[in-house]
Amino acid sequence: MAGYKRYRKESEVSYSLGITLTFELLKYKAEYVTRIFIHSEMKEGDTLKKLTEYSKAAGIEIVYTDKIFHVLSQKENCYVIGEFRKYQGVLTSEASHIVLVHPSNAGNMGTIMRSALGFGVTQMAVVRPAVDAFDPKTVRASMGAVFSVDFVYYDSFEEYRELFGERELYPFMLNAERKLYDIRPRGVFSLIFGNEATGLPEEFSCIGTSVVIPHSGRIDSLNLPIAASIAMYEAAKYK
Amino acid sequence: MAGYKRYRKESEVSYSLGITLTFELLKYKAEYVTRIFIHSEMKEGDTLKKLTEYSKAAGIEIVYTDKIFHVLSQKENCYVIGEFRKYQGVLTSEASHIVLVHPSNAGNMGTIMRSALGFGVTQMAVVRPAVDAFDPKTVRASMGAVFSVDFVYYDSFEEYRELFGERELYPFMLNAERKLYDIRPRGVFSLIFGNEATGLPEEFSCIGTSVVIPHSGRIDSLNLPIAASIAMYEAAKYK
């Protein structure tokens, strides 16, 4: 059997690090789980019993080994790892979307997924180049929301727009025409956010209705997951 | 001259890591700056010129050394460090506050400061045990907002309440009496948030008006900086 390798974007599988995350994986994406790894320091008890019973019932192999933990986890207290095949999500015309154009930080993407699930925006479009939604860091930051939010990658915003351009499109930009609390999204919509450092390119000001979250001039911008979460919070009010 | 040491909570000085952060430090807290360190790889040019002129005008010593960078900075491209004496802020009865009870993560605290400055909540109370607002990690995450947001530490919430209990107090809890968008803060108020993992203790439900940010049952809770930022965004609307 080959040694365990670090996660790479090209890998066919990814990992949930930790027991809570692995239960989320089993709950929502059991059909993609290939193996469950259990560390020798994992305590006997109800949690382990539940995990092993659940895995056996689903026909998932359990591997008792410490090796993969040295490779994948820098955190202490990580005694369970779930391995799963990457899968392909589907976006639909009936659902509102959050659209991330060139996001670069895995933690931010995971945090946005967690908020998105909280505010009922369960479909995400991602425009490349972009961080990997299956990166274990994204999975961890999402607190498992990654297993419930459908996401699809596009090579350009135009590709996304050809499929979903009929809806209300709201690009978030600092020099926008409308303030967030003056818009009332009805029906389905897409909330569009740019890269952490550079925001959306200027040409997005001609797409749909550009929106700004008003803030004082004392800061340059809001942090991306915060801006995206405030937008989803507002939009969720009118559903 | 003694060698440079890692930052510790007990240190009398702290540091701004990077050029942008150091300019923020010089802009808002020049009177506390003790030294500016410049790395040998810092490029000549307008930025360096502006920095040295500014420092000289303010009577701040400039030290050309690479050593402190090895000790304090893990990031590449950090060629300027500002050293400053820690200072004491003041909270006032006339200003609204954000109150963090037992926050444990430096990055989160910095991110909350950045949002707070953006939404005009420029005073923060922190109840111990709590993370260090002067930790270089907090300073960095705040993007310099730490130099503009006044903050004061308290040993207990009771100590804070004795000073500022007359105002509207809004503890944020999952099992709260009111939804965020049903409250209309008038006058001065305090938005109170608990620890990242445990939230506010149950006894806060008897203090002021407890508030929840409505979200679906698909997530356990929102991430702390996101919840605090949404609350400040809403409150800022009615000012």
Image (cartoon, coloured by chain):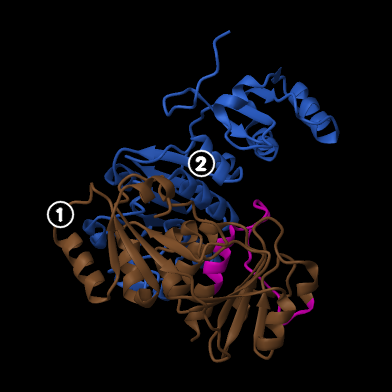
Chain colours: A blue, B brown
Q: Is residue A41 above or below residue B88?
A: above
Tell me the magenta residue range.
B206-231
Farthest left residue? B45
Residue hosting label 1: B44
- Name the one closer to the observer, A135 or B57: B57
Q: Residue at x 25, y 55 (%)?
A: A201
**Residue B100 place in picture, x, y as percent:** 62, 69
Residue drawn at (32%, 54%) of the image: A197
What whole-number distance in Å separates the C-alpha atoms at marks 1 and 2? 39 Å
Q: Residue A138 — which label?
A: 2
* Tag 2 secondary structure: helix
Looking at the image, can residue A173 be seen? no
The percent coordinates of residue B77 (x first, y second) are 30, 47
Q: Position of residue B48 (x, y in %)?
A: 19, 60
Chain to which mark 2 belongs: A
Residue type at mark 2 is Thr
> Dot 2: within a 10 Å radius of its alpha carbon, few (fewer than 14), some, or many (20 or more) residues?
many
Q: Is residue B227 magenta?
A: yes
Q: Quadrant of residue A26?
A: top right
